[in-house]
Image: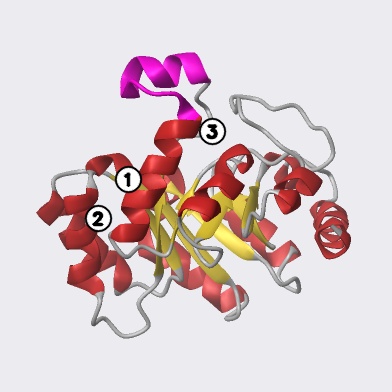
């Protein structure tokens, strides 16, 4: 299981300072919507300068008509990143269109589909999507798998069922991880590292427990140790 550190701080300066502090660790970095809109592709290049071995997950959650999603995915795939995501609820046609568009791009990044955001509780999810989270997330994952994507973004609670309905090699990436019992904030379906490991999660995304700490390196080391023994 890999650790992906969320660079969700209020400024590029703060995010770069955090990246510098953790540059010697084998981690991925998640660059989200706010950071990318604010700081652009130059920010991605600065991260790679800090450590060329950093793997970057560009978390933009594309959702539009199929051709527009494919256009955007083509441009993203030309950036020096390693993974990005789109919304599974855009539909199988949109996901297939994306994968067909980028299939011949050299060093194509991994593509994941968002199933159900971890900020959802079951009742408010069902109001929008008409199904329980566990049912719909698995269906979204099956659509993503059949469309040729590399994996999905889901909560730890759906990971094992998704793999059982797709493949053990189908990636699951889970936000909402609170490794040491921290406050869940605006996340609803949260889990710890041990549970994520048991549910066969491939990537855990952790932000606030790291960047709100007075000693991010110490927290990173504790998390990586937990991953190694889980």
Asked which secondary structure carries label 2, the reply is helix
Say whether disc 1 or disc 2 marks the residue closer to the N-terminus.
Answer: 1
Identify the residue at horizontal 61%, vertical 65% (top origin): 28
Residue 125 higher or lower than 98, as above or below: above
Q: Which residues are magenta?
A: 122-133
Mark 2 residue crowding within 10 angstroms, few (<14) / some (14–19) / many (20+): many
Q: Is residue 104 magenta?
A: no
Classify residue 97 by image quadrant: bottom left
Q: Residue 95 has which mark?
A: 2
Front residue (pair 198, 9): 198
* Quadrant showing the N terminus: bottom right
Residue 125 higher or lower than 45, as above or below: above
Residue 37: in sight, yes or no?
Answer: no
Do tag 1 and tag 2 residues touch (Cβ < 8 Å)? yes
Mark 1 residue crowding within 10 angstroms, few (<14) / some (14–19) / many (20+): many
Residue 137 higher or lower than 29, as above or below: above
The residue under label 3 is: 118
């Amino acid at each position: 299981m890999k650790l992906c550190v969320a660079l969700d701080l209020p400024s590029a300066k703060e995010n770069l300072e955090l990246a510098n502090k953790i540059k010697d660790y084998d981690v991925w970095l998640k660059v989200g919507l706010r950071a990318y809109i604010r700081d652009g592709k130059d920010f991605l290049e600065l991260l790679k300068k800090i450590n060329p071995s950093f793997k970057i997950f560009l978390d933009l959650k594309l959702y539009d008509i199929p051709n527009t999603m494919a256009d955007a995915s083509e441009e993203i795939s030309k950036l020096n990143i390693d993974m990005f995501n789109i919304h599974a609820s855009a539909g199988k046609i949109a996901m297939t269109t994306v994968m067909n568009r980028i299939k011949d791009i050299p060093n194509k990044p991994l593509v994941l589909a968002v199933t159900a955001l971890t900020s959802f509780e079951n009742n408010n999810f069902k109001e929008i999507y008409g199904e329980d989270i566990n049912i719909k997330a698995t269906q979204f994952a099956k659509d993503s798998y059949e469309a040729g994507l590399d994996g999905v973004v889901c909560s730890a609670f759906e990971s094992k069922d998704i793999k059982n309905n797709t493949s053990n090699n189908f990636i699951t990436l889970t936000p909402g991880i609170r490794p040491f019992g921290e406050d869940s904030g605006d996340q609803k379906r949260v889990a710890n590292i041990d549970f994520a490991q048991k549910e066969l999660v491939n990537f855990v995304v952790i932000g606030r427990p790291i960047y709100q700490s007075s000693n991010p390196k110490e927290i990173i080391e504790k998390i990586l140790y937990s991953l190694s023994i889980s």
